Image (cartoon, rainbow, N blue to C red):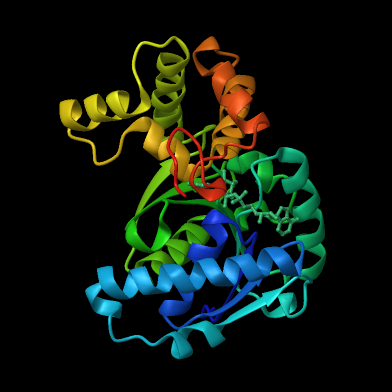
Amino acid sequence: MNIRTVAIIGAGVMGSDTALDIACYGYNVILKDLNTEILKEAEERIKQSFRMIKMMKKELCELKQEDVLPHIVFQTDYKGFENVDIVIENIVEVWESKKAEYKRLKEVCKPETLFAVNTSCISITKIGSLLPDTSKVIGTHFMNPVPMKKMVEVIRGFHTSQDTEDRITDFLKSLGKNPVVVNDCPGFVSNRLSHLFMNEAAFLVQDQVASPSQIDMIFKQGFGHKMGPLETADLIGLDTVVNSLNILYESFQDNKFRCCPLLKKMVDAGLLGKKSGKGFYDYK
Ligand code: NAD
């Protein structure tokens, strides 16, 4: 099966950048979200990201917006899903929402469609159980910002077939990505590790041990990381971080994943990080 059309479900932080990244390599992309207002915001975000890509990625610097944007169809329905080769699902990190979405997807997609799940923490095996052919379900944990990060953590669910893994890793390589294949567990490798750092950094702020910039500076200059845990949490979105910590806590029943109350309070107050203009840092 040649991959021609990719559907991205969810046009938020991850979905919009993933749609752009894939369209830059000539694939046809359907970008679906719940309403046209969200899709309009996504289109603006995509235009901004495109300017960044042209500056930062040598191999794409000749691309013109008018050559790339027409490859992305923005829509709120499932029109054309019968021709989709790969679905990349990027909706909110909430099990009930994902469950409802897959119920719909299994009705509209062809039997050959591969399902690539961009969850942060939910088990790929559990998501696979929502679809008739679990061998075609795999995790593709893209890193944020998607066009700039080459590594994609690919997660094999319990029933994921070798054929699905091969097709998805070939597809990712065609986008210039470097897939690293791991086995399924909540949070996989990246988020099982990174959420401990982000959560503990939030506790340090809550306990007034240090300011966010001091914590991030110690992390970066002390350990040689490019970004600190609180800068990373702001970039991901604090709502997504809280949802992920809750899933990790429920899955492992381990107190080390108990979400810091300050994170919850910030989300309740609408401080979601970069996407809302304020989190541990100011972005306005
Ligand atoms: P987000 O909140 O920015 O975007 C989610 C989007 O999904 C919203 O626009 C929402 O309207 C839409 N949505 C919800 N239900 C929908 C449905 N049924 N159909 C279509 N659209 C729907 O979230 P995000 O940060 O883009 O995260 C999306 C997924 O990617 C989550 O599972 C998250 O854990 C994962 N993820 C996030 C990051 C990150 O850095 N933010 C990194 C890797 C993976």
Looking at the rendering, in which quadrant would you find the N terminus? bottom right
Residue 263: give x, y in percent of width and height: 56, 25
Position of 142 relative to 107 (above/below): above
Rendering quarter of residue 55: bottom left
Q: Nearer the viewer, residue 199 or 153?
A: 199
Position of 47 relative to 207 (above/below): below
Rendering quarter of residue 271: top right
Residue sitting at x 48%, y 74%: 47
Q: Is residue 6 left or right of residue 153?
A: right
Residue sitting at x 54%, y 55%: 13
Q: Is residue 9 visible to the viewer in this orientation of the structure?
A: yes
Q: Nearer the viewer, residue 106 or 15?
A: 15
Q: Is residue 233 left or right of residue 91?
A: left
Residue 100: give x, y in percent of width and height: 80, 50
Position of 87 relative to 182 (above/below): below
Residue sitting at x 57%, y 39%: 272
Q: Is residue 66 left or right of residue 109?
A: left
Q: Nearer the viewer, residue 235 or 168?
A: 235
Residue 56: give x, y in percent of width and height: 26, 68
How many labels sit on residues? 0
Q: Is residue 32 visible to the viewer in this orientation of the structure?
A: no
Residue sitting at x 72%, y 44%: 129
Q: Nearer the viewer, residue 94 or 108?
A: 94
Residue 265: give x, y in percent of width and height: 62, 24
